[in-house]
Amino acid sequence: MGEFFDKILSWHIGSLKLSDIFIILICLIVALIADKVTQYIFSKIQKRHAKKPESHRAEVVRIMFDSLVRPLHWFFITVGCALGFVFIDVPEGWTTFIGIITTLLRACSLWCVFWFALRLTASFTTYFIEKAKATETKLDDMIVPIAGSTLKFLIVCIGILVIIETLGVDVTPAIASLGIGVGALALASKDTLANFFGALVVFFDRPFEIGDWVTINNVEGEIEEIRLRVTLIRTFDNTVVYIPNSVLSSANINNWQMRKWRKMDCSFGVLYSTTAEQIETIVSNLREHVKTHPETYGPSYYIHLDSFGDSSINIRVVVYSIDKGYVQHLQDKQDFMLVVMRIVEQAGTSFAFPTRTIEFSKGKVLPEIMPE
């Protein structure tokens, strides 16, 4: 019986022995079994931590295992295949080919490690972005996405260098020549560097934060995201404008979010039949209303008789409401305008509207206009 198996295993498929193919298959099967066992252990650990869904530790464990499952699966497969080729007796003429396959499998297994690092970075970036939204400060909302993008870029660069080195390419001369190429690279990427330093200006000077209502170079809207190269502004037409960060270092930035009060110009005109006493009553009552509502209006206001218009006596009314958001500002303005209407009605007069009076003198005949 043993001789029968020895005879079968000595068969050749091309230049490879059937026993060598069995070794490769066995290594691959062992790798798949190890993958299944590892996933089973991971699932058990996750289920144990899932009993505390609000736990920070449970969320971290979930992120790590979710990021690891797919890269680890392909890592086991590539390592199993590579080990199979290592254990077999390489036939003559196949040394170079098997060496290339082994090198490629080794490079793929290394890339699985960097793949895991990329997935882990992306998952943690998303996790910390959600955490940053729950904090009062908005600085972390800006830092977390850029830190995540920078870390992913570094992982990709290091991964490419390591894999190139694994493939047998000497990267030392390339790294040594970076000193010569830095000048040319900086010159070619001056816009990219300008955008990067523009992002640093935003972080250190903090002219705005995510969610602020701003006007930058005639673009008005809400800051939605700050990236390494551009800043995204969501306009009130629900479009997105991409502004290069290099522009921010020299642009005039109007941050509406930083104001303490919002101006309400509610000037109006009353009829010319209004008496001086009625105007004094209107002005006095409006001032009293503003003074008695410090929770709504700011300390500065302008309520005065302003001018005599063509068809009205104009009263200048400028009041500042405490900034509690645009919607609340509209409500405060509506409430104040209704107060103005009631005070004018209580004073016994009314608002004026454009009128014109034409007087004809008695006994005078209008000149006759003769046709040409």
Image (spheres, grey):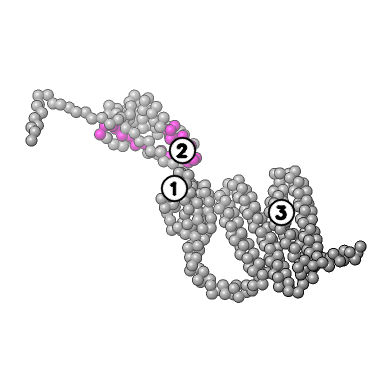
Residue at 8% x, 35% y is 372
155 w.r.t. 124: above or below = below
Query: Does label 3 or label 1 sit earlier along the sequence?
Result: 3
Q: Are marks 2 and 1 in contact (CB under 8 Å)?
A: no
* Distance between mark 2 and mark 1 Cα atoms: 18 Å
Which contiguous range is marked in magenta?
A: 310-336
Q: Is residue 348 above or below residue 301?
A: above
Q: Which residue is mark 1?
A: 220
The CA distance from mark 3 to mark 2 is: 52 Å
Amino acid type of the residue tagged 1 in the rendering: Glu
On screen, residue 145 versus residue 264, left or right, reads right
- Count of numbered tags: 3
> Sequence-wise, which precedes: disc 2 or disc 1?
1
Q: Which label number is shown at residue 329?
A: 2
Q: Which is more N-terminal, label 2 or label 3? A: 3
Q: Which mark is residue 88?
A: none
Residue 369 screen position, x and y as percent: 9, 32
Of circles 3 and 2, the one toward us is: 3
Residue bearing mark 3: 69
Q: Indicate which label's residue lies in the foreground, 2 or 1.
A: 1
* Mark pair 3, 1: CA separation: 45 Å
Q: Which secondary structure lies at badge 3?
A: helix
Q: Amino acid at mark 3?
A: Val
Residue 369 shown left or right of residue 10 in the figure: left
Residue visible at 27% across and 26% down?
273
Estimate the x, y position of residue 164 in percent, counting from the top left.
64, 69
Tell me the element at label 2.
Answer: helix
Taking depth in this image into account, of 5 and 323 the one nearest to the observer is 5
